[in-house]
Image: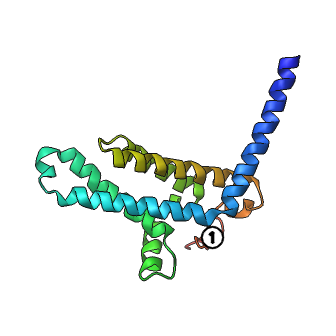
Amino acid sequence: MAAKQMGKEAGKKATAGFGQLSQFVRENNWSLRGLSFLGSLAMIVLSILEIVNVFGILTDFFGYLVNMYSFIFAFVMLVIEAKDEWPFIQSWRARVLSNFGFLRTNLGRGLFEIFIGGIWATTSSIWTFWIGVIVMGIGVFYIITHIGGCCGKDKETGGVPEGVPSPILAPSAS
């Protein structure tokens, strides 16, 4: 009986802690987007450094291919997280969102960042490992934001960051 009561109390405290964490992330969404932007920028720089090494095609073809894909994925995330006022961002963002609609939600962004971070964390460099771990952490926070947004005050937008059209609220193409 005492164990059951302790389990209930632990569940209540975990739920309250998750709610506080979710609220903090939602209220500080700019920092999450900023971290995601910086992580994407770091991935782009390291990918370019690896891509410039054209001998990498001969010595490690699949590693070279992973760097090419990593550059593309990081560029996609950079475009999504960049400010609207920057040149060419709105047109690129529209292009990206029309092809990768799942990036309109925090859940989609979180899963995408965990996917990219997982790829980076499995490479041989210590730098790419830590960047991968950080990007996966950012992905987890996006998922927490999504869960908090779906269950909290942002229920109608699905936890979508400010400035990104919600798939729920976007006009249908008919």
Q: Residue at x 11, y 53 (%)?
A: 55
Q: Nearer the viewer, residue 154 or 36?
A: 36
Q: Residue at x 77, y 61 (%)?
A: 153
The quadrant in which the N terminus is found is: top right
Q: Residue furthest top?
A: 1
Q: Residue at x 22, y 45 (%)?
A: 62
Q: Nearer the viewer, residue 91 or 59?
A: 59
Residue 104, percent across and down? 55, 63
Residue highlighted by disc 1: 162
Residue 39, percent across and down? 44, 58
Mark 1 crowdedness (10 Å alpha carbons): few <14, some 14-19, many ≥20:
few
Residue 23 visible in rendering: yes
- Would residue 4 be found to the left or right of residue 19 on screen? right
Residue 122, percent across and down? 35, 40
Give the color scheme: rainbow, by chain, secondary structure or one colour. rainbow
- 127 shown above or below 104: above
Residue 167 visible in rendering: no
Q: Residue at x 35, y 49 (%)?
A: 127
The quadrant in which the C terminus is found is: bottom right
- Would residue 18 be found to the left or right of residue 69 on screen? right
Type of amino acid at the residue the image marks with label 1: Glu
Q: Quadrant of residue 9?
A: top right
Q: Quadrant of residue 14?
A: top right
- Would residue 55 be found to the left or right of residue 123 on screen? left
- 101 shown above or below 127: below
- 96 shown above or below 89: above
Q: Residue furthest front?
A: 126
Residue 21, percent across and down? 70, 50
Q: How many numbered marks appear?
A: 1
Secondary structure at badge 1 equals loop
